[in-house]
Every structure is written in structure tokens, then in C-alpha cells.
Image: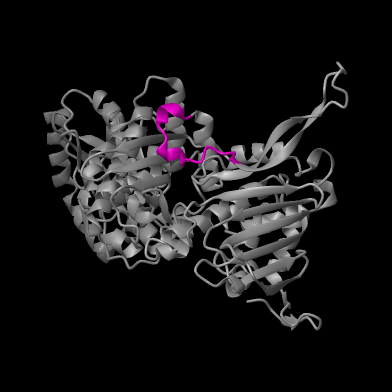
Amino acid sequence: MSESVQADSQNPELKKHTFEAEVAQLLHLVTHSLYSNADIFVRELVSNASDACDKLRFEATNDDSLYEDDGELRIRIAVDEDAKTITFTDNGIGMNETDAIENLGTIAKSGTKAFLDKLSESQKQDGQLIGQFGVGFYSGFIVADTISVESRKAGEPADKGVRWVSDGTGSFTVEPITKETRGTAITLHLKEEYSDGEDSYLDRGKIKRLVNKYSDHISLPIQMRKEVWQEDVADDADDDTPAGGEMVLTDEWETINKASALWTRSASEIEDDEYVDFYKNITYDMDAPLTWTHNRVEGRVQYTQLLYIPKKAPVDLYTREQQHGLKLYVKRVFIMDEAEQLLPMYLRFVKGVIDSADLPLNVSRELLQESRDVKSIRDGNARRVLTLLASLANSEDSDKQEKFAQFYSEFGDVIKEGLGEDMGNQERIAKLLRYATSTQDGLETSFEDYKGRMKEGQKAIYYLTADNLAAAKNSPQLELFKKKGIEVILMTSRVDEWAMNFLTQFDDTPLQNIAKGAVDLGDLQDEAEKAEAEKAQETLKPVVDKLKTALGERAKDVKVSTRLVDSPACLVVGEGELSPQMIQMLKQMGQDVPESKPTLEVNPEHPLIKKLERSEQFDDLAQVIFDQALLADGGQLEDPAAYLKRVNELLMR
């Protein structure tokens, strides 16, 4: 609510309210420093008027008397050159006095503080933020020194109307009025610089162009009074001088937008620029979308889908609690923003509109959660998006390949979540994934590419997870594979190890994490190597047993390694167990992690292991070897000071 209320002594019904402190701060920013594009106010006030009509249409599904014998919803824009005003009028849901104070005197729903915090990051956002935070009404103060609002709520008596007036400096007044028609009229009293010269908004042609640019997709008719050419009447019938004339306003209202929702039109009739403008209007994204898909789906469930892939990831992409979703319409009636049930969570970056022919108009978020029709729409949307991405990934067109590379750099990690969340589309998702490998650094290799390069006799797709590419390429786990020229996929995203728990094979070829379990190269390892490994197991058994004793509870087991070439040791976890990186990540997320101990594998040919056999500092050296293996595997030391002390003592001996 506003901070204080004062009654006017001459008009007791006129009450003066003081804006909230944060609203006053917002208005100062809006009028002095926020916008480099004043045209935005047209978009915002038309959008608000459209929302008011949508709300009435929704409420009237249960009570059609709210239409008051006027069921043709519309928005009208009137320009008065003499009064230097522009008026935006709608016959939507309207407001009473309480609504006006709540909606125009405060910013309760969207949160002024969140808006102001966002502005502090970037002072000039050119208009996208104001719509994003639901404070579009205040954009009128960019061009107006005073705004007056007259409104009456649908279904209430004519004498329950309200007039709201403010100059945007710190207060506003409200008073009751009689208003015969429902809906809202917002009148902007233009500042001098916006009522004269090149920047004047009293030019009807300019207003029409702005409506076509920003609001052509609005499904309601947006109307202005029609202008016609009227010739001058000649004073003398015998005078051959051509008669002059001028454009004059008539009492007829003409529709200046297409007045049909863009998604309801045939895709073949829509220009790319229209798709881009619509995307920008519904998302407040300044960038054009990367790509989009527009389809009418027929079958047991009928709906229209217009889905966009953004060019850039939003800052809250990995905040899973943040509400995401599509705009939902039912038979062109707006139902809700951000209907998250229409997409699986791993596709939360997708924007767009769904218009269903089958869902009930009174559908709620709870009903959406339980509806079989919604599940069918969600599955259809997921398949459509994945098909769209596959068409980019598999295209021979360089522009489409570049688009997919851009998509993957922004959304590759979040799409991997689908391996565990959408088992029905797991194969489709797996085909989209791209990785670096031990022979290629860029995120270019798909599982299919890898399979095409597998060595003869190779029975598995080998991969390794690590914190980053450098750590992966230098991992001791890779040494045997490098020696034999076997390519290994390098996975360096935080989500990779979690996601790969759900993907055990690709195209009937098993996937094997080379840092988990025993390394079995099958036909790629000759009999002489196997015999040598078995011999090393016997020869080094006394050292292995002594290492088990020295390490105690730190290691699950100690074994002679068949995977090491240059390093003295490495840590290995069993199949299905958590790696040190995964344990570290889960702990950082504040989760309780079950205790998991790795197995230490030692290289029998390494000089350090050979030295260990005869070392007098066996226990200290054993601990250092284990700690170094832990560090090489991306883990963290529990006691770095103790590690440094041991290393220093060994160096001094």
C-alpha cells in the first residue's frame, strides 16, 4: 500500500497517496536514466491493455454477464493534438479504487527491489527489463509529465469508477467517478519535448508504425480513428485552379494491427522478421532467437506450438527453483505465463507459446500437473525441440552447424540432464552430445563420430571425467590408452558423471569409464602383456600388503595396475561408486555423501614404487604417493599441512 493518505479539503472524495519509497526511486530512474528508446511506452501500455482483456475473457468463462452486452474486446488509441495527449483505452476487466491503489501505487507482485537490483547491474537496458518485471505502466512517465487513469471494474455499478492521477514525482490522487463503460482509459499528458518536433508522439502515423513494430501480434484489434482526404470546395465554379485539401479524422475506428495471434496463422504466411519480433515481445530478449519451430499438432490432443531456442543462456538457467515455462493459451484465451508443466525440466531454456484446443479454460497449475493431455503436449514439445536441434546438428549447411555449436556452448550442459530425466528420449539426447577427446580438444565429437573411429577389436566406448580439459588430458588413467593409440572421450562438465550414470550404452556399444573398475582392453591387449601383469602381481605382493597396512582406512584396496605407464600410482573407484570429483561436487552443494574409499593402483615399473620396496620411510612415502594420486584425480587433501610436512621431510633425507 502507499505510505500515507490525505483528503483534499475542497474535495473530500479526492485522496492523495504517497508512493512507496522504492516506487519513487523507480520512477526517478525511468524518467531520468533508464531508457534510450522512449518508444517502449507504446508496447507496454498496449500489452497491459491486452492483458486486461485476456483477464476479462478468462473471468467471463464462469460469468458471461461481465461482458455487459459488449463482447467485442478491443484496444483504442486516441491522439489529441490540441490537448497534447495520447489515450490508450481498453474494454477489459477494469479496476476499482482498491485495485488502482494496489496496482498503480505499488509494485507488489513483481517486486520493485528485484527490478532495482537488476538495474544496478546495467543502467541502460533499452526497455526489456520493465516488461520483464511487470512494471510497464510506469514507462508512460518517460514521455508524459502527468498520467491520468479512469477505470471501472467489470460487473460493478457505473458509480464505482475511479480516477487515478499522478505527475510521477512522489504521490498520486484517487477519486470516485461515474463511468458508464467497463475497462480502463490511460491518458498521457505529453512533455513538451515529446509533443513537438521530430520526437512528437502526436503523429498518428508514428503511433501506427510503433504498433505494427511492437504489437502486431496482439490478437485483439488495436484501433485508431480513421483519417480520410477531404478536398477543399472551390469558391468559384469557373475557377480552374486545382482544389487543395487535407486529411481529416472521422468518427470511424479502423484496426491498425493484423489482429490475429501470430501462432494461429499459417507458417508459410509469416516472415522471419515477424517471428523474431514476436519472440522479443514475449521474452524481452534484445537478441534474436537462435532458431524456432512452429507447428499445428493433430491427433488425440490438438494444439499449436511455437517454440524458440534463445541465442544466450539466461543467468538463472541453473537455478532449478526459478520458474520457467511456456505461455499457455486455450482456444486463444490466455491462461498463464510460465507453464512449466509443458516442458521437461532439462528443456527449461525453451521459450514460446502453446495454444490447446482440448484443455479446460479453468485449468490450474495443479490440474496441469495431473492432466494426461498436458503430458502428451509435454512429450510432443520435447520431441519437437530435440528434432529441431538434431536438424541443426546433422545439417551439412555451415550456418546451421554454427548455430548448433552456439547452442551447445550455451545449453550443452543442461541438455545432459535429460539423460536421467527423460528416458523415453535418451537416445535422441545422446546423439546431440558433443565432447573433446584425447586426440581432439574441441567440443566436436559425438558418440557416433567416436564409434566410427574405434580401433578394430575395440568393444567399448571409453571415457574419462575430470574437472577440466587439462586435468583430463594429463590424467594417469589415460596412459595405457595413449600408448596403444586408443581414443578416449574426455568429459569435463560438472554434470557429466551424474548424467553418465543413466547412459550405459550407445547404439548397442557399452560405455566404460576408464577410472572405474578394472581395465579390460580385450583383444587390444596381447597375451604377453597379460602374462607380464600377472607376474607383477606376484612379485609386488609383499609391497602391496605393506601398503594396505600403511594406508589403513584411507584405501579400500591396493592393487598392481595394468593401466599405468608413466605415473607411479592412481586411484580407481568401483563401478557404480562415486568418484572424488563427484564427492567434492556433492559436498559443495551441501549434500550428505556416503563414505566411498578408492582403490590405489601402483605401477610396478615406476622407480618410485621400486624405491618403496626398500625405503626406510615406507609409511610416509606411502601416504605421499596416495595423496599425489588423489590430487592427480582432482580430489582435495583432507590435511594439506601434513602432506607438505611429509614431502619436506622426504626431500631433506
Q: Residue at x 26, y 29 (%)?
A: 448
- Is 18 on the left-hand or right-hand side of 95? right
Point out residue 502 in the picture as x, y percentages from the top left corner. Answer: 23, 48
Q: Nearer the viewer, residue 537 or 439?
A: 439
Location of residue 555 by image quarter: bottom left
In this view, 326 is above or below 594: above
Q: Which residues are magenta?
A: 254-270
Q: Residue at x 76, y 70 (%)?
A: 170
Q: Nearer the viewer, residue 346 or 336?
A: 336
Point out residue 313 in the picture as x, y percentages from the top left corner. Answer: 49, 45
Q: Nearer the viewer, residue 356 or 431?
A: 356
Quarter that holds the N terminus: bottom right
Q: Residue at x 40, y 31 (%)?
A: 266
Q: How is the image coloured?
A: one colour
Location of residue 401 by image quarter: top left
Residue 611 appears in view: no
Residue 133 appears in view: yes
Q: Residue furthest front?
A: 237
- Is 294 on the left-hand or right-hand side of 282? left
Point out residue 627 in the picture as x, y percentages from the top left corner. Answer: 37, 56
Q: Residue at x 75, y 64 (%)?
A: 168
In this view, 266 is above or below 185: above
